[in-house]
Image (tube, rainbow, N blue to C red):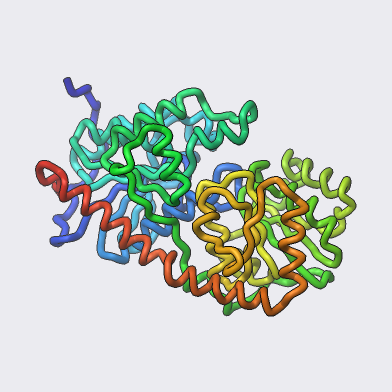
Amino acid sequence: MTPSLGPVPTRPPAAPLAPGVLAIALVSEHASPLAELGGADAGGQNVHVACLAGALADRGHRVTVYTRRDAPDPPSRVRLREGVEVHHVPAGPAEPLPKDVLHAHMDEFGRYLARGWRTRTPDVVHSHYWMSGLAALRATRVHGLPLLHTYHALGTVKRRHQRLADTSPPERIPGEIEIGLGCDRVVATCRDEAAELARMGIPPHRVAIVPCGVDPDRFTPKGSVAPRGPHPHRLLQLGRLVPRKGAAVAVRALARLPGTELVVAGGPPADRLDTDPEVRRLRDVARDAGVADRVRFTGAVPCEEVPPLLRSADVVVCPADYEPFGIVPLEAMACGVPVVASAVGGQLDTVTDPGTGRLVPPRDPDALARAVAGLLADPAARAACGAAGRRRALSRYGWSQVAAATEAVYCDVLDAQPAATSTG
């Protein structure tokens, strides 16, 4: 029996789409493509959803991104660019909430999607992150729509690494299994994730691997460079400021790297750095290691300032405890900057050692310092790694290539449907 969905949101009917053009719904409950990057819950997924939406639109498709309304002010719908609209879904209070408490609002999110899709039915739905997957699963079942899902991170991996520090709700792992078995295709971002899904019982034939991407026209070796400090060398760590990203490892490694500064970019706005618990913890680590004068925290960085900041670094470090994919290594490689990353997750696919940088064991400041020191001492090796990284980014990870591969998975799923689902 189909549940009552309540009143349908007022919306004019969509114009028919041209042949071959898909109406695509991307569901990203906490990671809005409009968010400023670097906050606790704003990072790679936001970039991925925004860039994938744009690249799919470049291929002629019409894309709507559904994300939870987390403020009262923005309009219900925002045009992100030609062919892409962001739809703010009322689910829970219109205020920022930690993503770990959003599960309670996913039924409401899913009901809203199902109501809206009565009159504006997408051809294909692609959910991002497990809570989006649960909301989308419920809505697509009502209408018999094809559903693809990208996890971005897996609860089994998080629990294995964080143990008692894992704040995920208990529903996460069962929910992820339900999504993997209930959707039409899982779009994994790397081989490590595909292997983890198999261990979870998701049949390999239900999994396609399509990596995250990078914009090689924005992230390029040419362009402005952020000012540097007085030290001969600069390391950069960029991304969300949470313990698993390994900034403490980079700070401790700095003690073995004289003449080098470490810029840690990300986290809260600069005017709130002093009250941020992770910044305070890292400053204590820096003081204990005797490098407090060589560590600089920038806070959240506007998107337009990220490429110049990357270009200012001699080496970009990505020492995460675990990394489901990791977009920062790709951005650094596209800018022609060598990367030293922990040998985990998606970084095993993106960073080639010794081609584009170095891979080191996670949580090992000595290994990180040795790898960085070798590159800092050898300008020719840095240049070679940077050039190889640029070539690799261009050949494998441009968003146009990622969108084409994603579209191919969509079409494969649509071709397998028992009946046409498009109502345009």
Tell me residue 164's x, y (percent): 63, 26
**Vertical order, 140 against 360 (above or below):** above
Q: Quadrant of residue 281?
A: top right
Image point (80%, 57%), residue name: 254
Q: Residue at x 55, y 61 (%)?
A: 351
Quarter of the figure that contains the N terminus: top left
Residue 125 is situated, as x and y percent measured from the top left of the image, at: 28, 44
User: Does residue 395 appear left or right of residue 294 in this picture?
Assistant: left
Against 56, residue 276 (above or below) is: above
Q: Is residue 239 left or right of residue 294?
A: left
Q: Is residue 305 visible?
A: no
- Foreground residue, 397 or 388? 388
For the residue pair 91 and 244, the one nearer the viewer reads as: 244
Q: Which residue is at a point 36% across and 47% down the rendered structure image?
A: 187
Residue reaching furthest top? 1
- Residue 279 is situated, as x and y percent measured from the top left of the image, at 75, 45
Q: Please state if 390 lies on the left or on the right of 25 as rendered.
A: right
